[in-house]
Structure formats: structure tokens, C-alpha cells
Amino acid sequence: MATSQIPSVLGMGLSGTEKGRAHVAVALERQQDVMTATIDDGKANALTFEVLAELRTALGTSADAKVPLVIAGREGYFSAGFDLRIMRSGDWDRISALVEQGVLLFREMFAAPVPVLAACTGHALAAGALLLLAADYRIGEPGRYALGLNETRIGIPLPQFAIDMARLRLSTNRLMAATLFASIVGPQEALDYGYLDGIESDATTATRALAGEMAAVGLTAFGQSKARMNAEIVRRLSEPLRLQQT
């Protein structure tokens, strides 16, 4: 998908809160042995301080209950990245604090002893794409939406934590295109890049079904295997955050 085919992307992503304050909406529900956290701010599902905190709470609730967590977006948007009100503000302390909260969520997702799955219902850009990469399994839907790390095309160097996550989750033969050349792709190509693991007509339903299958067989072996698989990335994301001002 060419860059011109996607919505305008500035800063770290699209803001869902530029025109006044949108309501914070991360709805958490439990259906049998699966928790679902649905992000819906009515706009671009920007990752604000509040949304990040609510996703961390949802993750903690799932871990305490020992059930899988599905993170889903609203129709058309999974998440278009960090809140641009802050990323454009010039307040470096606030920018750093927001990114630190994002990294904390990603680290906790990698470290969670339960399956964390993502239902990609639309655009997943910049930090929204990183949210996908932090999930254990990602199912998208067919459609005309964009996924990718667009930072270098808009003059923002990728921070080390983003590069570490990309190296872990993206296809080796697509890594340079995805990072240095900031390729933005549609859902079908995202399978090849490694942003998605599957495509279904209803991503949320399919992801919940897979999570339910995992819950039915027990999560002890899963949790132990995940801890071993992700030990290095958890360690890397625990290092002090170093952002470069541009």
C-alpha cells in the first residue's frame, strides 16, 4: 500500500484527541475464560496516558484471573499511535513519560504469563503497530487499512526499543523495509511482513475463539514457554529509555 493511500500521519501516529478531549474508552469484558479489552475513543484510538493505563489494568486483571486477553480495536482503527497532542507539544518531559508508559505496557505484554492476542480491526501505525508486535498472536481483517512503522519517513528516528521489537517479531527479509524504509502495508502484505499471523472476516470473534482454545488446554506450559521465549526482549525493554530529540 503506497503511503499516499493512507491517512495523513504526523509525529508518532494519528491523534484521536486533537479536536477536544475524546472520552477514554477501553471496555473490558469477560466471556467464559477469555477477557477482551476493546479500545474505542470514537476516533483513531490514540494511545493516551489513560488508554495505556487501562490496557495495563486489563492485562493485570487477565493475569490475576489466569485467562487469555484479547486486545481489539474499533471498526477501522486498531490504534494509530501515541497521542499527538503530547507528541507535538514540545514538552519533552511529557513526551518521554508517555513513551515510557507505552514501553511499560509492551514489556508487561511480553512478560504476561497468559496469552495476549490482538484483533486488528483497522489502521495500526507507529506505536499502534508496536502494540500489535507485543501481542503473542495477531489476527487482522480484510480491508483497505494500513499497518507499519512510519517514523523514518517523517523524520523521527526509531528508538531502540522499537527496533528490538521489530527484530523479534518481523520477518527477517522484510525488516529493513519495515524499519529503515518505513514501508506501510495492507493486511495481506502484513502477513508476509510479520505484523499479522492470520486474516479472518471477523478478527475479534476469531481471536476470541483461538484464545478460548488456549484456555481450554491450560496455560501453565504456555506461560513457562513464553517466559523462556521472551526473556531477552523483556530484559531489553527493562533498560532505561533513551529518546533522541529531533
Image (cartoon, rainbow, N blue to C red):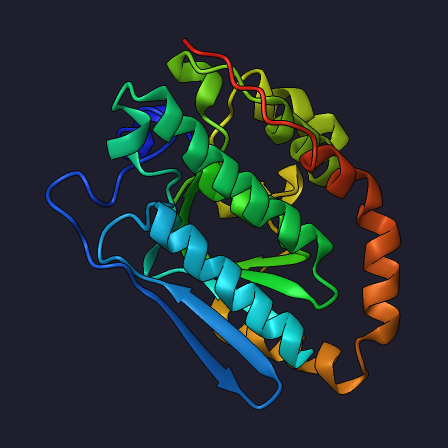
In the rendered image, the residue lying farthest to the front is 93
Residue 241 falls left or right of residue 1: right
- Does residue 174 sit above or below 67 in this rendering? above
For the N terminus, the image quarter is top left
**Picture quarter containing residue 207?**
bottom right
Residue 13 falls left or right of residue 59: left
- Does residue 64 sit above or below 19 in this rendering? below
In the rendered image, the residue lying farthest to the top is 246
**Picture quarter containing residue 173?**
top right
Q: Residue at x 81, y 84 (%)?
A: 217
Q: Position of residue 12 (x, y in %)?
A: 39, 28
Q: Is residue 143 visible?
A: no
Q: Position of residue 68 (x, y in %)?
A: 64, 73
Residue 242 falls left or right of residue 84: right
Q: Residue at x 81, y 66 (%)?
A: 223
- Does residue 29 sit above or below 126 in this rendering? below
Is 20 in front, or is 38? 20
